[in-house]
Image: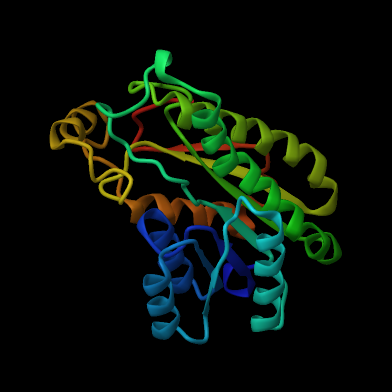
Amino acid sequence: MQIHDQVVLVTGGARGLGLAISQCLIAEGARVVVNYHASKAQAEQLALQHPQQVFACQADVTDKAQVLRLFAAAKNHFGAAVTSVVNNALIRFEFNGDARPKVEDLTAETMLQQFDGAVLAAINTTQAALDDMKQAGFGRIINIGTNLVQNPVVPYHDYTAAKAALLAFTRTAAQDLGQFGINVNMLSGGLLQATDASKATPDAVFEMIAAATPLRRVTTPEEFASAIMMFLSPYSRAVTGQNLIVDGGLVKG
């Protein structure tokens, strides 16, 4: 199925990286379900700009009941089921090395908040999409990870552990769902310049990353978003259970 034939849900799709993903999908001709939690104005503005392609819908993706309502509303709006899901939403996190919790500060609440935002949210959207994807014999699920799992240059313990768990779920889900024509993959980025989550990062950190990166620059949200299109396109129909690192070559493998 070509991208322009798909109905793609982007969680957290109204700001930061999510907005870049939504805009890239719009440019490809897809119908886009822009999920938001608090960014109502931004989501509705996007829907006003692209009324034929964008449906903005509020839902807390850690709440299964709200996610089920989100999928039903999207299907009703477009008259077609969601074919593809990009699990992008980031729950209350900021890349601020000085303010991060150290090992001695970690709590179950801190860890579970990030686990819920990464893994539970992906489980909720995957389960909500399954019936229609199975019926169609087609589905694309793309989870957004981080290269900090491979290279924890800044030890964001809660965030990185949650994304590592999401990578494991990506691979187990791919094994379970491939028989139905559903591909599950992950794209992992480094620090992006710039998003709401990275605005607290000092310029010196971006400069250090750029100097160590083969492309000699920090990846932008738009560059990362464009790589997602590969996993949505027919060219990756035999690719599942993979983790593609998109960071300009900084981290290998």
Q: Is residue 207 left or right of residue 178?
A: left
Relative image position of residue 192 (x, y in whole percent): 31, 44
**Residue 17's image quarter?**
bottom left
Residue farthest along the top direction in this orientation? 104
Q: Residue at x 69, y 68 (%)?
A: 69
Note whether 145 is above or below 32 in the view shown: above
Note whether 239 is above or below 50 in the view shown: above
Q: Is residue 83 left or right of residue 195?
A: right
Pick the front one: 123 or 133: 123
Q: Is residue 162 left or right of residue 50?
A: right
Pick the front one: 133 or 217: 133
Relative image position of residue 183 (x, y in whole percent): 70, 49
Q: Is residue 202 left or right of residue 40?
A: left
Q: Residue at x 36, y 32 (%)?
A: 249
Note whether 6 is above or below 125 in the view shown: below
| Number of numbered labels in the structure image | 0
Relative image position of residue 184 (x, y in whole percent): 67, 46
Position of the N terminus, as image quadrant, is bottom right
**Residue 83's image quarter?**
bottom right
Pick the front one: 234 or 89: 89
Q: How is the image coloured?
A: rainbow
Q: Residue at x 80, y 65 (%)?
A: 132
Relative image position of residue 241 (x, y in whole percent): 67, 38
